[in-house]
Image (cartoon, rainbow, N blue to C red):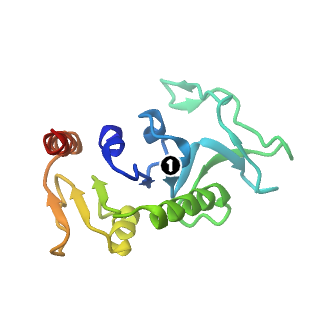
Amino acid sequence: MREIAAQLPDGAFVFTSNVDGHFQKAGFAPDTVWEVHGSIHHLQCAEPCSAHLWAADGFEPIVDPVSCRLVSPLPTCPHCGGLARPNILMFGDYAWQEERALSQQARCEAWLTRARKPMLIELGAGKAVATVRRFGEGLGYPLIRINLRDPDVGKAKHISVPLGALAALEGIEAALSCKQA
């Protein structure tokens, strides 16, 4: 995906409902990713006592494989000493500190304003939690939906690709390479 983005005049911006940081691990710059549901790589106070977020770098969970229970200490808030939690949005979650995601959203919106011909590539977004699908369909830009089980897009200007993400991305990359040759 990074290789495809590198060939585009305006690069790419990632909108993801995943909370695992895989796009950053794959080499996307953190300032080009909007993690709409937050990130397990950041913590917040469970109360919350403040809107402060911090990196989860120092927390290494150790789980007893027999009992499936956490044996390492739980993370704590550096401000109040209370329990800390991942900065991720859970269902019915009114304590989620969304400031980090709102900052990412502002960067995405600025990128969309600057991009000359935005186009969306949606990878494997499901129907159960349809955040990514609604986002892509709501923007009104051309959309390539890559989804092995649910590829239907329903509009003429969109493209359905009933493949796995890797195979489809390799095909798009190959097509771009042929076009540039």
Viewer can see residue 125: no
Identified at 36% across, 51% down, the residue is 9
Residue at figure coordinates x 49%, y 47% from the top left: 19
Q: Secondary structure at mark 1?
A: helix
Q: Residue at x 17, y 56 (%)?
A: 149
Tell whether 132 sits left or right of 76.
left
Tag 1: residue type?
Thr
Return the x and y of residue 74 as percentages of the image width and height.
69, 35
Q: How dense is the environment of label 1, judged by Cα within 10 Å: few (below 14), some, or many (20 and up)? A: some
Q: Residue 150 at x, y = what percent?
A: 19, 60
Residue drawn at the location 54% of the way across and 24% of the way down: 64
Residue projecting furthest to the front: 181
Q: Is residue 126 left or right of residue 135?
A: left
Q: Is residue 31 above or below residue 90?
A: above
Q: Quadrant of residue 153?
A: bottom left
The residue indicated by pointer 1 is 32
Indicate the quadrant containing the C terminus: top left, top right, bottom left or bottom right. top left
